[in-house]
Amino acid sequence: MDVDTHSLEQLQGMLQRNNYHVFIAADGHAALRRIQTSKPDLIVSDLLLAGLNGYEVWEEVRTDEQTAHIPILVVSALMLPSANESMQFLPGNKRQTLFYDAFLPKPVDLGRFMRIADKLIAPDKNRQTPRGPTVMVAIEAPELRQSLVEMLHAHDFGVETSAILSETQRLVRTTSPAALLLDYRTPTKAIRQLIFQIKRLVPNTAIVLLTQADMMEQSLQNKIHGVIQVPLQANYVKLVIEQVLELINSRYRNKTLTEQLINTQQNLLESQETLRAQNEELQLVNAKLRELDKLKEAFVGMVVHDLKSPLSAVLGALNFTLIDPRISLTDKNRGMLNGAIGAGNQMLRLIETLLEGQRLEDGRVELDVEPFAWEDLVAESTHNISPLLTLHRLGVNLAISDDLPLLYADIHMTQRILENLLDNAIKFSPRNSAIVISGEVVEEFLKLGVQDAGPGIPKVEQDKIFNRFAQVKNNQAGRAGFGLGLAFCYQATEAMGGRIWVESDGEFGTAFYFTLPIYQEEKMVVSGH
């Protein structure tokens, strides 16, 4: 698992040459699925993976009983804490434990990689495996070559040898050792050509030359990474190689992190550009929606005004017919006319509610706040809806104390709230039942209520019935409607400093309550000064 395709190809090729069957995963999610289905003998993974990152994959592997035993070899350009220790990737983030068994830094030393992989897969068969980086000793002189091999083995380096200079290039390309030692005591054209070829073909392999004196040619200064002078000293050889490899690894890490930073910045710029374009498109859509909303409001206003005029004419004709002494009406005729007048007045209230609700939404309503008696308002409203009460054979019961204080609100707005709630109660009340109108003091407010004996409102629907065009669903009793009156009641009570709510057990009976401020003369005097 690796986003670095070059490293992935190198590792895959090395494993296949050593007769291992290799599965490749494109990202962390694919890797986890492959691990869970195939149960491999070894997991080779980078930390930086698409989808799930490395430590998330390793944690899933370790917490699954069926995969917890599989060893994990991490190959990464990043420096990681020791295996099974925790680290904090970003300030403020929780610490994450890194579950792995071995770590190999990039650039990849293929020989060392195979030694570690073999050790993890079959630990009992590889007890004496060197743990250090691989160094290729490409020196024709047998004594010098053997001396270097012994020194490197003593310091736990992995060692490859090449006694024939012409074979060195092929061996280096095949194994990608961490370092290559060349004999430069007698400079030749073949040595110089080999250095240029290795630098071009295997740039991550460090080239270290053995010399007898300071005799380095200017053309080779930027091609090699270190020099060891003979006669050889074991500790000096070890020190030079370690310093050279640390320098190579540091440069590789810096290059990798710089590329990742550039890619991240590019992705951020692309994301910002995408967001900017989406924001511009959203602004255009919003502008069109606002324009359509204004057209809709203007259309609704015109329709409502156009409805109001003929309806008023119809009501006028009905009322005139009812009181015209020249027309003889039976009791049944009078009842039908009164019912029609009541229904017409109900429709007129709905039209006025639509107009007033639109003005409330637009903030174009100026409240005319004054003190008034709740009892007087109840009497006028019940008189206005009396034809409907008669038509539906309903009564009204009052549960109002005689000593209620005055309300301090817009009387016309309050009357519309009450009549909308009464219209709602009439719509759902069974015949021969009664609607209860109540009023009581609660702190600095009057709590006013309209209760019917109709079907209840389910609990899940009660929070949204004051939304415009909301309908009660899944109610067998058929309590449904477009909610325009209730939406207006909500807007109006909020505008006057009160609130409105519904109480129902969901089965039988519904009560709507709203609060409005009480008139307090002392506060009015103080505010007047």
Image: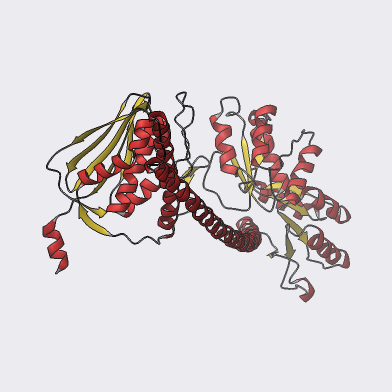
524 in relation to 500, above or below = below
Residue 422 locus on image (x, y percent): 34, 38
183 in relation to 491, above or below = below
Quadrant of the image containing the C terminus: bottom left
In this view, the residue in front, 101 or 268, is 268
Residue 94 locus on image (x, y percent): 44, 46
Is residue 72 visible in the rendered image? The answer is yes
* Residue at the (38%, 25%) spot, across then down: 430
In this view, the residue in front, 11 or 48, is 48
Residue 342 locus on image (x, y percent): 40, 39
For residue 97, side relative to residue 70 (left or right): left
Most distant residue in the front direction: 326
In this figure, what is the number of numbered marks? 0
Is residue 458 visible in the rendered image? The answer is no
For residue 5, side relative to residue 157 (left or right): right
* Residue at the (86%, 56%) spot, across then down: 165
Q: What colour scheme governs how the chains and residues are painted in the rendered image of this protein? A: secondary structure
In this view, the residue in front, 346 or 154, is 346
Quadrant of the image containing the N terminus: top right
* Residue at the (62%, 57%) spot, across then down: 242
Most distant residue in the bottom direction: 218
Residue 228 locus on image (x, y percent): 69, 63
Q: Quadrant of residue 99?
A: top right
